[in-house]
Amino acid sequence: MHIVNVHQAKTELSRLLVRVEAGEDVVIARRGRPVARLVACNAPVKRRPDVLKGKIVVPDTFFDPLPEDELAAWESR
């Protein structure tokens, strides 16, 4: 872990980002007291919208109105 003060962080941000990309955590301190941490972001996960296509079956009754007692339970009546 690398600790820098705010002024140093402002003047060396590009260099600090290189260190973070290399896997190092950088702590930014104000008057010697840690206030923030720079850490690498995880790469976004590529979403696959059709991953469950054909694996889940929704019955025709799914959109039928709920029975009154079950509806009351959901609505906290």
Image: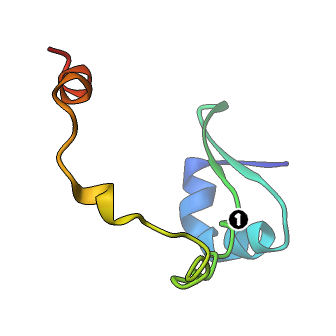
Furthest-top residue in this view: 77
Location of residue 60 with respect to 65 vertically, above or below: below
Q: State which quarter of the image contains the C terminus.
A: top left
Residue 29 at what x, y percent from top left?
63, 39
Task: Answer with the quarter of the image where residue 18 lies.
Answer: bottom right
Q: Nearer the viewer, residue 4 or 73?
A: 73
Mark 1, other Cα within 10 Å: few <14 / some 14–19 / many ≥20? some
Q: Position of residue 5 (x, y in %)?
A: 64, 46
* Residue at (84% x, 73% y) in the render: 22
The amino acid beneath tag 1 is Ala
Q: Give the residue at mark 1.
A: 40
Label 1 sits on a secondary structure element that is loop
Question: Residue 43 at what x, y percent from top left?
Answer: 67, 75
The colour scheme of the drawn protein is: rainbow
In the image, residue 22 above or below residue 32: below
Q: Residue at x 59, y 32 (%)?
A: 31
The structure residue drawn at horizontal position 21% and vertical position 53%, both measured from the top left corner, is 64
Residue for point 22% across, 40% down: 66
